Amino acid sequence: MKSLFFYLMLLSMTLASCGENSKSEQQNNNEPKEATSKLSANHIEVLYFHGSQRCITCRAIESNTLALLDSLYTKEKADGKIVFRVIDISDEKNEKIADKYEVTWSSLFVNGWKNGKESVNNMTEFGFSYAKNSPDEFKKGLKDKIDQMLSEL
């Protein structure tokens, strides 16, 4: 019972820290833009949602995801088979997509699109469990999910 309480407290503190304001943090408006003309009909969307204030774990999810995609999937990104989008949910223009995935805080989705049908994979809990303290484990799990989905395209 004590360990359950400990994990609930840890989760609560992690979620609360995502709302802390870091004065030194500058909002990065240079979000990756993907050319829709290169988008493959069957593809994978890696969606990273964040608010205007982000904790160190939130930033680790984004940076580790980007590092993995840039190191292992450059061809797939160039071919439109993998699309990476960073979405600021505090921006009004992103309200519709945040509502679609019911996102209210930092979240990571790896979704597959095949023949017009979307397979949604919410990897937020996984991301918060590993991105900061076990980045290699995070990248391995993300790679495994992406490779599985690529094999199904």
Image (cartoon, rainbow, N blue to C red):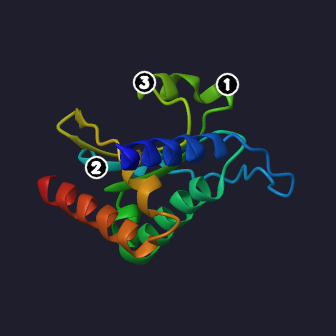
Image position of 153 (left or right of 98): left
Residue for point 57% across, 47% down: 14
Q: Which residue is mark 1?
A: 92
Q: Alpha carbon of mark 1 to alpha carbon of mark 2: how far?
A: 26 Å
Mark before the other along the chain sequence, 1 or 2? 2
Camera-side residue of 33 and 135 = 135
Q: Residues within 10 Å of mark 1 (few under 14, many from 20)?
A: few
Alpha carbon separation for disc pair 1 and 3: 14 Å
Quadrant holding the N terminus:
top left
Q: Amino acid at mark 1?
A: Glu
Disc 3 vs disc 2: which is toward the camera?
Answer: 3
Task: Find residue 26 and report its image quarter.
Answer: bottom right
Given contact means CB atoms under 8 Å apart, are the residues at marks 3 and 2 in contact?
Answer: no
What SS does tag 2 mark?
A: strand
Question: In the rendering, at what x and y percent does residue 143 appear?
Answer: 30, 66
Label of residue 43 in the image: 2
Furthest toward the front, the residue is: 2
* As drawn, 124 above or below 102: below
Sooner in the amino-acid sequence: mark 1 or mark 3: 1
Q: Nearer the viewer, residue 42 or 125?
A: 125
Residue 82, quarter of the rendered image = bottom left
Q: Is residue 62 left or right of residue 126?
A: right
Residue 150 place in picture, x, y as percent: 20, 59
Mark nearest the camera among 1 and 2 is 1
In whole angstroms, how far apart are the C-alphas of marks 3 and 2?
A: 18 Å
Which numbered circle lies on residue 100? 3
